[in-house]
Amino acid sequence: MSDLGSGDEGISGSKYNASNMEGASSRNDFDTSGSAVEQELATKMLQIQSKRFYLDVKQNRRGRFIKVAEIGADGRRSQIYLALSTAAEFRDHLSSFSDYYASLAGQNAGPPNTDNLPEDGKLKSEMMIKDNRRYYLDLKENARGRFLRVSQTITRGGPRSQIALPAQGMIEFRDALTDLLEEFGANDGGFKGDLPEERHMKVDNKNFYFDIGQNNRGVYMRISEVKNNFRTSITIPEKCWIRFRDIFNDYCDKMKKSSDSTPITADNNLQTTANSLK
């Protein structure tokens, strides 16, 4: 059976290592917002049938991750991003999918029979969740063969990014992932300690809530103002806290100096008036 059918519909991407690819929304969760250097630690290239796959281990201040880029024979390019812990989970799923594919290959010799396919073409599916990202793994079959489609979505919205791996290359891909994970481990890096508890304060008829959270972008503080049923919030990344505090302290000091000088000026004026009346 040929597995050239990995050309699933809807797969699109941008040029590998080009600026428009680096700006894709799927990458934003690993990006440094242009404020820090992204380091490439290792790379592997796989030629699976007519496709090339690049597995790049990268690192920034938020931790380590693997960028998987697919380049098809027709020049189409697509990519997904995996935290190292997600890559380890994906590797384990690849073993399961490979075993299932082997059982199918033993049962069905010859070209695929499209008459017996499920309506959506899916033979086996799994899902992975990492922070605000979901990964859908679908072993599919169409008239051209069997392939594993890996789709990455972001819960807060944004385009879906996906790659399609020919089923015959799943073991080779798994072994390449294993080599990288053995070298770099499955620890994503980033902050691992306990986060401070929520704080609250009330000023007149307003409530202010201070919440410390963490996602794949790092640690942040969310400050929410609640009045009646109206709520507004701002989010401050942990890397900006010191600068934010300094600016806030500067305004506090200036207001304090201004308020301290007011009564002194008033007292002086009273004293001058009193002296003039003597």
Image (cartoon, rainbow, N blue to C red):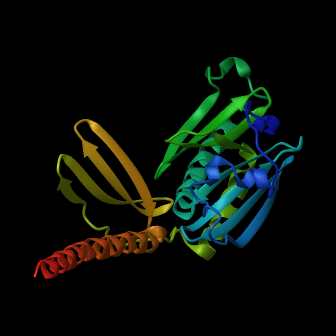
For the N terminus, the image quarter is top right
Identify the image quadrant of residue 179.
bottom right
Residue 93 horizontal side relative to residue 254, left or right:
right
- Tell me residue 269's x, y (percent): 21, 75
Q: What is the x, y in percent for residue 241?
A: 42, 70
Image coords of residue 103 (percent x, y):
63, 41
Q: Does 65 sit left or right of 261 as displayed?
A: right
Outermost residue on the top side: it is 115
Q: Is residue 78 left or right of residue 87?
A: right
Who is closer to the viewer here, 99 or 109? 99
Q: Residue at x 68, y 59 (%)?
A: 67
Q: How many badges with numbers are in the image?
A: 0
Q: Depth check: 260 or 100 in front?
A: 260
Q: Considering only vertical position in the picture, is 159 above or below 265?
A: above
Residue at left offset 60%, top offset 47%:
99
Q: Report whether residue 1 is seen.
A: no
Give the vertical position of 210 relative to 151 (above or below). below
- Residue found at the far right of this picture: 74
- The structure residue drawn at horizontal position 24% and vertical position 42%, both measured from the top left corner, is 227
Q: Is residue 199 above or below residue 189?
A: above
Q: Is residue 36 visible?
A: yes
**Residue 13 lies in what quarter of the image?**
top right
Q: Which residue corresponds to the image point at 61% horizontal and 60% vertical from the top-left? A: 31
* Quadrant, the C terminus: bottom left
| Residue 260 rendering spot, x and y as whole percentages | 24, 76
